[in-house]
Image: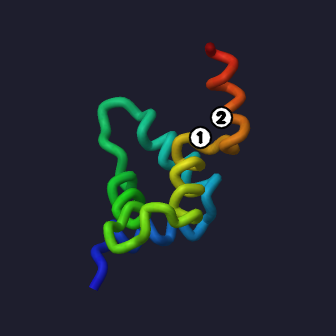
Amino acid sequence: MASNSTFEAKVLMARGKRATAAYIHTDCSNTGTSPRHLNEVLDNLLNPAKPIDEWETIDWCKWLMAGGRTPDEFSSTVRGLV
């Protein structure tokens, strides 16, 4: 049986990439607390039983790095800092 936090992470991920990424970004930005679902989401995405080059996993990682913005918006922001 899955733990409650794993279940919560799967429910969070079912909301979609943008919503999940925004939630994780906000959760990680709160100082003084550790993110509640980050590890569970990453454990699900980076499962060693899944191929490393799976497009869906790569896309999820892009959205998580973008923190709730689109990967293209994030890329433009980063390029603008150089």
Indicate the amino acid at tag 1.
Ala
Label number found at residue 74: 2
**Residue 53 locus on image (x, y percent):** 49, 62
At a point 54% along the width and 56% down the height, the residue shown is 58
At a point 42% along the width and 39% down the height, the residue shown is 28
Label number found at residue 33: none
Indicate the amino acid at tag 2.
Phe
**Residue 36 locus on image (x, y percent):** 35, 52
At a point 62% along the width and 25% down the height, the residue shown is 78
Please indicate whether residue 66 sits to the left or right of residue 43 in the image.
right
At a point 45% along the width and 33% down the height, the residue shown is 29
Residue contact between numbered discs 2 and 1, judged by CB atoms under 8 Å: yes
Task: Please say if 53 is above or below 3.
Answer: above
Q: Observer-nearest residue: 4 or 81?
A: 81
Q: Which residue is mark 1?
A: 66
**Residue 22 locus on image (x, y percent):** 58, 46
SS class of the residue under badge 2?
helix
Count of labels in the image = 2
Please indicate whether residue 25 sits to the left or right of residue 82 in the image.
left
Q: Residues within 10 Å of mark 1 (few under 14, many from 20)?
A: many
* On-image quarter of the C terminus: top right
Between the C-alphas of marks 2 and 1, the distance is: 5 Å
